[in-house]
Image (cartoon, rainbow, N blue to C red):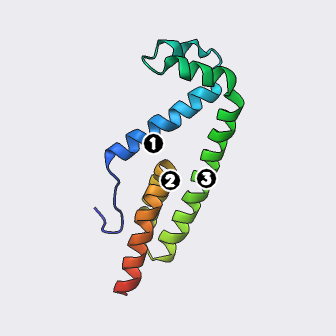
Amino acid sequence: MSKSFVSSPIGMYIMTICVTSLFAMLGFVEDGSVFQGVPVIGSFLYNVNTNWKQLMQILFGIIIIAHAIEGLYAAYLAMSSGMSFGDTMKWVLQTLILGVFSLNVLKEKCKEAKKSS
């Protein structure tokens, strides 16, 4: 494995994918009754899906746009620090999924690379 790429813990991926999926479901599922079977928070999720669907769609769009911009910035940082194409693409993909969590690690890697050169 390359020294230029640091994979985030699997828990970060699971958490991010679950939260993003929940936002997508709250915004785009037509029949909110699917949420009523969820223990403890089912009625809350049903209420959000029924009364705040448009807001959830807007928030989901903002999340997608923010992660895309972060991915582009990750590509810029990785390429400007002299990382290989493969490592750059790994950072971009990880940042598209995890967002700022991955970007902070990449920034630290770039600082370390500047100090050592």
Tell me the number on the disc at residue 16.
Answer: 1
Nearer to the camera, 114 or 62: 62
Q: How many numbered tags mark residues here?
A: 3
Dot 1 or dot 3: first in sequence order is 1
At a point 38% along the width and 79% down the height, the residue shown is 113
- In the rendered image of this protein, does residue 89 appear above or below residue 46? below
Q: Secondary structure at mark 1?
A: helix
Q: Residue at x 48, y 37 (%)?
A: 19
Q: Tag 3: residue type?
A: Ala
The amino acid at mark 1 is Thr
| Pointer 2 or 1: first along the chain | 1
Residue 77 location, x and y as percent? 51, 71
Residue 67 vertical placement versus 72 (above, below): above
Label 1 vs label 3: CA separation?
14 Å
User: Residue 65, labelled with which disc?
Assistant: none
**Which quadrant of the figure has residue 18?**
top left
Q: Quadrant of the N terminus?
A: bottom left
Query: Looking at the image, which is closer to me, 1 or 49?
Result: 49
Q: Which residue is mark 3?
A: 66
Q: Quadrant of residue 61?
A: top right
On the question of residue 89 being in view, the answer is no
Task: Say which residue label 2 marks.
Answer: 99
Residue at horizontal 41 percent and vertical 77 percent from the top: 111
Q: Residues within 10 Å of mark 2 (few under 14, many from 20)?
A: many
**Residue 89, position in %: x, y?**
47, 59
Where does the image place residue 62, in percent across and percent down from the top left?
65, 46
Q: Do callouts 2 and 1 mark residues in contact (Cβ within 8 Å)?
A: yes
User: In what quadrant of the picture does the C terminus appear?
Assistant: bottom left
Is the residue marked by circle 3 packed among few (<14), some (14-19), or many (20+) residues within 10 Å?
Answer: some
